[in-house]
Amino acid sequence: MTAEAATTVTAATTVTALTTDRTPAGSTANPLVAATAAGHHRILTGDRPTGPLHLGHYFGTLRNRVELQSRGLELMIVIPDYQAITDRDRADRPAEHAEDLVLDYLAAGVDPERATIFTHSAVPALNQLLLPFLSLVSVAELSRNPTVKDEIAHSRQSAVSGLMFTYPVHQAADILFCKADLVPVGQDQLPHLEVTRTIARRFNDRYTTLFPEPQALLSRAPLLLGTDGGKMSKSRGNAVTLGATADETARLLRGAVTDPDRHITYDPEHRPGVSNLLLLTALCQDRDPHAVAAEIGNGGAALLKRTATEAVNEYFRPLRARRAELAADRTVLREVLHAGNARANAVADRTLTEVRAAMGTF
Ligand code: ATP
Ligand code: MG
């Protein structure tokens, strides 16, 4: 498959996103990631500390982060702990979840010496950017964000908090404080990226040019489905985690939603459950999902699920072994976060000084 730039349209916003694909039939070359690496300098992306990472994170963004870092881009990873209280009253053990995320990153191949992994609550200057940034967007723009609407629908709260509506602006601060120019994300983040780009543009127009307009980088799996057929999510009880055992993986995938047609075909629009398992298998084996479907033929959903389970367990065996080794010493995880927070604070202080100068404040 060739690399391509695609325009992705969501219900309320339009954002130009790069999509990436892997060359089928055995090659691990990833042309778009290679091309992207040449044109960009700093990546920022992150994951809420609401639970362990799952296959959607890995194929949606994490694998691209590792690849881009290995190509020399600077990698910043935010663990947005304030964002954990957008859809629930209290975050459940946010510090412990943050350490678990570091565990997943290191097991997946992120180099902690070169990456800055930080929790945004520990970076006051970053949070202060929220105030001028809020002045750059309208209430109407905030309230028509489709991802926020979907999250409200799945929220555990009876009332919607102000933080829920404004967190995409907070996310703009997460991205712009370090002037990241590339953001590897899943599809649900595209409306937020558009908010970030709008804020950067309006700040630059109103004051002085300070911020890049960052580009989204989508993977071949911008929306991996969970076992219930909805977006695989940490908070929706439908995920296969990176650290799951082989038996857990088999049990979870056995319960995945498919359809009764025994003839297996790759048709994401009409057969989302079946196609999702085919894509998952294809990603693990670096193949084309149509070829996986042809191989299964009339084997039905049971064979498809066994095939997907074997592919996932085979692909993730080394990552899971590394994860188990790293889990033995949690002080390392805390040290990574302390060092990351110190680095992020230095960057945020510099940016806030520039923002104050641009706005003419003290
Ligand atoms: P939560 O349910 O707590 O919101 P989540 O599983 O949605 O958790 P996030 O921390 O919100 O995970 O998202 C982190 C990053 O992973 C984002 O870039 C998001 O787009 C990406 N991502 C999350 N789920 C998927 C998925 N199913 N497929 C592809 N990318 C995903
Ligand atoms: Mg989410």
Image (cartoon, grey):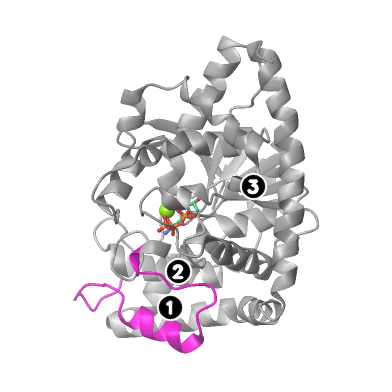
Q: Tell me which secondary structure the magenta stretch mostly adopts.
A: loop
Quarter of the view holding residue 173: top right
Residue placed under numbered mark 1 in the picture: 308
Quarter of the view holding residue 229: bottom left
Residue placed under numbered mark 2 in the picture: 280
User: The residue under label 2 is which amino acid type?
Assistant: Leu
Contact flag, marks 1 and 2 (Cβ < 8 Å): yes
Tell me if mark 2 has few (under 14), some (14-19) or many (20+) residues whose alpha carbon lies within 10 angstroms of its own: many
Contact flag, marks 3 and 1 (Cβ < 8 Å): no
Mark sitting earlier along the chain (1/2): 2
**Residue reaching furthest right?**
113
Residue placed under numbered mark 3 in the picture: 122
**Residue reaching furthest bottom?**
247
Q: Residue at x 69, y 51 (%)?
A: 68
Q: Is residue 101 above or below residue 301?
A: above
Q: Nearer the viewer, mark 3 or mark 2?
A: 3
Residue 285, position in %: x, y? Answer: 54, 73
Contact flag, marks 3 and 2 (Cβ < 8 Å): no
* Badge 1 element: helix
Q: Residue at x 30, y 73 (%)?
A: 264
User: The residue under label 1 is which amino acid type?
Assistant: Ala
Distance of mark 1 from mark 2, alpha carbons?
A: 7 Å
Residue 147, position in %: x, y? Answer: 35, 43
Q: Is mark 3 within 8 Å of ligand 1?
A: no
In the depicted view, which residue is nearer to us: 81 or 169?
81
Mark sitting earlier along the chain (3/1): 3
On the question of residue 115 being in view, the answer is no
Residue numbers of the magenta segment? 236-264
